[in-house]
Amino acid sequence: MSNSETQETLETAIARQNDAGLVYIFDTTLRDGEQCPGAAMTEDQKLEVAHRLEALGVDVIEAGFPVSSPVQFRAVQRVSRELEAPIIAALARAVPRDIEVAADALKDARRKRIHTFLASSPIHMKYKLGKEPHEVLELAVQAVKQARDYVDDVEFSPEDATRSEWDFLVELVTRVVEAGATTINIPDTVGYTTPEEYGALFAHLIKHVPNSQNIRFSAHCHNDLGMATANSLAAVKNGARQIECTINGIGERAGNTAMEEVAMALRTRGEFYGLHTNIRTEEIIRSSRLIRQVTGMSVQPNKAIVGDNAFAHESGIHQDGVLKNRLTYEIMTPESVGLESNRMVLGRHSGRHAFKDRLVRLGYILEEEEFQQVWNRFLDLADKKKEVYDEDILSLVNDAQSDQDFQRYELSSLHVSAGSGSVPTATVRLIDRENPEEPRTITDAACGDGPVDAIYNVLERLTGLAIKVDRFRIQPLSEGRDAQAVASVLLKIGDRSFAGKATSTDIVEASARAYLDAINRSFTAQTEEITETL
């Protein structure tokens, strides 16, 4: 097949795809994304990410910049050999050596593209290239022609296009299309443009470049002003049919357009855009987590689509609405991006409805009086913790149910003094309900080898019991630095053993309450024995 026949076939295919409303997703996580400081990947990691991108359904994978290093070359080579469905692209400057190496790295790819670029803005041409506009035109044409000698699919990017002169861009794009370019990418290299301006630029090029209907125009945006996604969507609204992006929006400086954002925007607002992608959106979360893992770059909690809070609700008003109908506060389902469900974050802003719903989900249907008791405990805990987890709620219910038993002693106050070079001392005040009708307050202090030992010494003195601690354990109940701790003890009192446990965000307080819980259980057991004897 001759080049002219191939070109005609490609142009026909592109025109048909444009008419069908398909927006190609060109993923550059392995190239532009990897240029983000600290995000470099090994060959094996790049291959793993490439397979994940294939599973995600991206149309084009820019696998790397082969001439830049042996690692980059081998990575592009391995991706080309192993992947079947996507087009594999390799980046090359408008330099003969770059294009030769890119072609060599891509030779085993089933579908291949050389992506070549050359700066076109006045500031880049003058200070970076040191060339006149007519020289840039000739270099660009030569690069595209050389790339077409190796592959049928050539993409050309006028670097810093959004700061270029529009008449010069029309001339440059026209010349490289005549030379054989099949995709024209318009990079907002420094994140300078706005949606209105960027959209107008695409409309201008499509109107003034001859045979533009046979070319796929592409948007490549950086996020320096926080408008990468908006700019990319403005481009497709004005005729672009490819978006260049990265998973989690990683990339140089403030990053690139986030793939997950444009994919979900086109899916969620399909009636507005009238466009679609081939992305399997249910694979988004898995892909996002892989990128976090291999790059070590976390995602801010409020990041759109993939942030931990993207489908989380804490406000009582929002939680109540979502429980009644998800559409009240969710424009897309968590399942649509690969999450099992949304997340009701219980905290100080949560309402009774959301809390009661969580209790039911955990298997507890409480009478109103018992629910109110647990609810009050929840409010107290929520003032101490940013987020209340299911484990915390289970502990609240268990503690409330335990409180229904006879409680001989109640911890009224606790003060502990401990530190380097000082003797740990604990002062405890208890309410003693030996006579429930006339409870009394008792207070004492004691020292110990540590704060917990001091507490246990004073409790033993206050209760008058001979106690042996057979087991003592502290462990976190949930996540985070403000997590509750659960303290559990096994005490030998007389000839019997009694277990006690308690939870608190203060591990010292939890230790005291657990010890007191075991003591109270010993008195409950004594009461039961007397009842049975009677």
Image: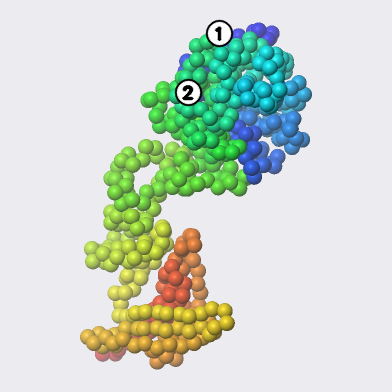
Mark 1 highlights which residue?
210
Q: Can you say which quadrant of the picture contains the C terminus?
A: bottom left
Q: Secondary structure at mark 2?
A: helix
Residue lying at 53% horizontally and 85% vertically, measured from the top left: 423
Nearest to N terminus: mark 1 or mark 2: 2
Residue lying at 68% horizontally and 10% vertically, measured from the top left: 3
Residue 366 location (% of width, % of height)? 27, 63
Residue 391 location (% of width, % of height)? 42, 62
Q: Which quadrant of the view contains residue 68?
A: top right
Q: Can you say which quadrant of the picture contains the N terminus?
A: top right
Q: Which quadrant of the view contains residue 429?
A: bottom left
Q: Nearer the viewer, residue 27 or 13?
A: 27
Residue 285 location (% of width, % of height)? 50, 42
Q: Nearer the viewer, residue 85 or 70?
A: 70
In the image: residue 186, left or right of residue 106: left
The answer to whether mark 1 and mark 2 are in CB contact below 8 A is: no
Q: Secondary structure at mark 1?
A: loop
The answer to whether residue 450 is above or below residue 94 is below
Which of labels 1 and 2 is toward the front? Answer: 2
Q: Nearer the viewer, residue 191 or 518?
A: 191
Task: Please rate how many residues cluster around mark 2, counting C-alpha atoms within 10 Å: few if below 14, some from 14 to 19, many from 20.
Answer: some
Residue lying at 41% horizontally and 58% vertically, measured from the top left: 386
Using the rendered image of the protein, determine whether residue 210 is visible from the camera's viewpoint: yes
Residue lying at 32% horizontally and 61% vertically, measured from the top left: 364
Residue 156 location (% of width, % of height)? 63, 20
| Callout 2 amino acid | Glu
Count of numbered labels shown in the rendering: 2
Mark 2 highlights which residue?
197
Cα distance in 3D space between marks 1 and 2: 22 Å
| Callout 1 amino acid | Pro
